[in-house]
Image (spheres, rainbow, N blue to C red):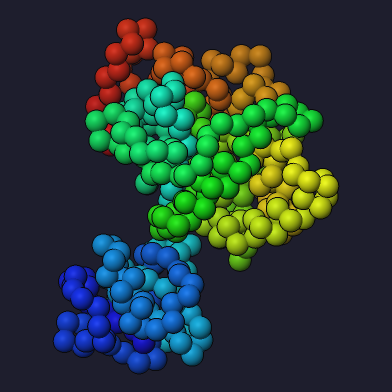
């Protein structure tokens, strides 16, 4: 069943499919280069319609009972069996990758001030196409930014062979919430960034432009020693593979370690996605420059134009200084010295 409407779906009580407000077509799939996301467990066209009504961006839906396929879309319909690729626009030019970015913050910590400043000036994760923050309680950061809630203790003890933060359970809970919120599925890449990571979204877009999505997805390894957590980058399919396969990895590693493996979340995901779930792993060592990955001596100057991110910069003044040094054209000269930031005329586009 295909359905399309130029005015969006009406907000009303959901009953039987009503052809009075839109056009229905048997044997058609909705065809678009602006697809929203797929959902599992949709057992009827009526249930699919209800999902579409609850999504403000949805202008049409398709539900394929015979082929066990379903999904939401935001524009028109096409012949059954057609598939619209997202790799190029109508003129053959490559489609710019889109980013969904999120961060976990500890309430009452220095991270609140860092994130509030980033939000105010549209930097870090807030330079992505969409961004979200999570915490273990609802907190307002700055004037209008409110966190999503993950019901888990954010205390992470250190231990294991490398003395890292044993935060795997914490971030599995966060990832579960990210998937449940489903906003990531509107974009081609998902980025998890630490609040004290100086991150340049535009540089990342230029990097991921070269990678093509695969059936199970791909993710980027940011360090020769293995993926590190301050900036993690996953394609949309990789997020879905990780979510569906995390329990498989958990059981595998529990047996391997004769109990819980004393790993951080970054090592767990790295060992899970590649070796166990067969997600493609690509190496890009300019993704992250940080103190735990053998950086050059002058790395804190943040002047490596190839680096997508720098970590850690926990102090707001140091964060601002790194940001300005890495991209001098982004702000008016001297903002870090005065502690007052004024956006340059072209910073907002």
Asked where in the image residue 170 lies, by quadrant, the reply is top right
Q: Residue furthest bottom?
A: 26
Query: Of 27 and 39, which appears nearest the observer?
Result: 39
Q: Residue furthest top?
A: 337
Which residue is depicted at the point 21% across and 86% down?
Answer: 18
Q: Quadrant of the N terminus?
A: bottom left
Q: Position of residue 189 (x, y in %)?
A: 49, 51
Number of marks present in the image shown: 0
Say whether residue 126 is left or right of residue 234: left
**Residue 141 visible in this rendered orientation of the protein:** yes
Q: Is residue 147 above or below residue 335?
A: below
Which residue is depicted at the point 72% across and 29% down?
Answer: 159
Asked where in the image residue 102 lies, by quadrant, the reply is top left
Q: Position of residue 322 (x, y in %)?
A: 47, 18
Say whether residue 205 is left or right of residue 20: right
Q: Position of residue 339 (x, y in %)?
A: 33, 11
Q: Is residue 144 above or below residue 59?
A: above
**Residue 210 visible in this rendered orientation of the protein:** no
Say whether residue 160 is left or right of residue 221: right
Q: Position of residue 145 (x, y in %)?
A: 30, 36
Which residue is depicted at the point 45% across and 69% down?
Answer: 38
Q: Quadrant of the C terminus?
A: top left
Query: Of 111 and 117, which appears nearest the observer?
Result: 111
Q: Is residue 288 above or below residue 27?
A: above
Which residue is depicted at the point 35% across and 39% down?
Answer: 138
Query: Of 18 and 325, which appears nearest the observer?
Result: 18
């Amino acid at each position: 069943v295909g359905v399309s409407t130029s005015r969006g779906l009406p907000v009303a009580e959901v009953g039987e499919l009503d052809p009075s407000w839109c056009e229905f077509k048997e044997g058609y799939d909705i065809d678009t280069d602006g697809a929203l996301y797929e959902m599992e467990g949709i057992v009827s066209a009526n249930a699919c319609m209800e999902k579409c009504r609850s999504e403000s961006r949805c202008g049409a839906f398709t539900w394929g009972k015979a082929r066990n396929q379903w999904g939401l879309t935001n524009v028109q319909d096409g012949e059954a069996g057609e598939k619209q690729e997202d790799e190029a626009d109508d003129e053959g030019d490559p489609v710019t990758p889109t980013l969904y970015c999120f961060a976990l913050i500890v309430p009452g910590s220095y991270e609140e001030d860092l994130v509030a400043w980033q939000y105010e000036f549209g930097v870090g994760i807030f330079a992505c196409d969409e961004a979200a923050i999570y915490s273990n309680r609802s907190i307002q950061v700055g004037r209008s930014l409110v966190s999503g809630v993950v019901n888990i203790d954010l205390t992470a003890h250190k231990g294991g062979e490398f003395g890292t933060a044993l935060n795997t359970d914490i971030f599995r809970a966060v990832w579960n919430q990210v998937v449940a919120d489903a906003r990531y599925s509107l974009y081609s890449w998902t980025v998890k960034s630490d609040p004290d990571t100086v991150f340049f979204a535009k540089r990342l877009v230029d990097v991921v432009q070269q990678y093509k999505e695969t059936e199970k997805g791909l993710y980027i390894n940011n360090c020769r020693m293995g993926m590190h957590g301050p900036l993690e980058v996953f394609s949309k399919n990789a997020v879905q593979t990780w979510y569906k396969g995390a329990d498989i990895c958990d059981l595998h590693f529990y047996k391997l370690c004769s109990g819980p493996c004393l790993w951080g979340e970054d090592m767990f995901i790295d060992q899970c996605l590649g070796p166990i779930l067969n997600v493609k792993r690509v190496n890009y060592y300019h993704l992250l420059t940080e103190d735990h990955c053998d950086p050059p001596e002058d790395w804190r100057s943040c002047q490596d134009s190839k680096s997508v991110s720098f970590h850690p910069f926990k102090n707001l003044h140091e964060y601002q200084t790194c940001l300005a040094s890495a991209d001098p054209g982004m702000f008016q000269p001297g903002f870090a010295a005065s502690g007052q930031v004024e956006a340059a005329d072209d910073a907002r586009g």
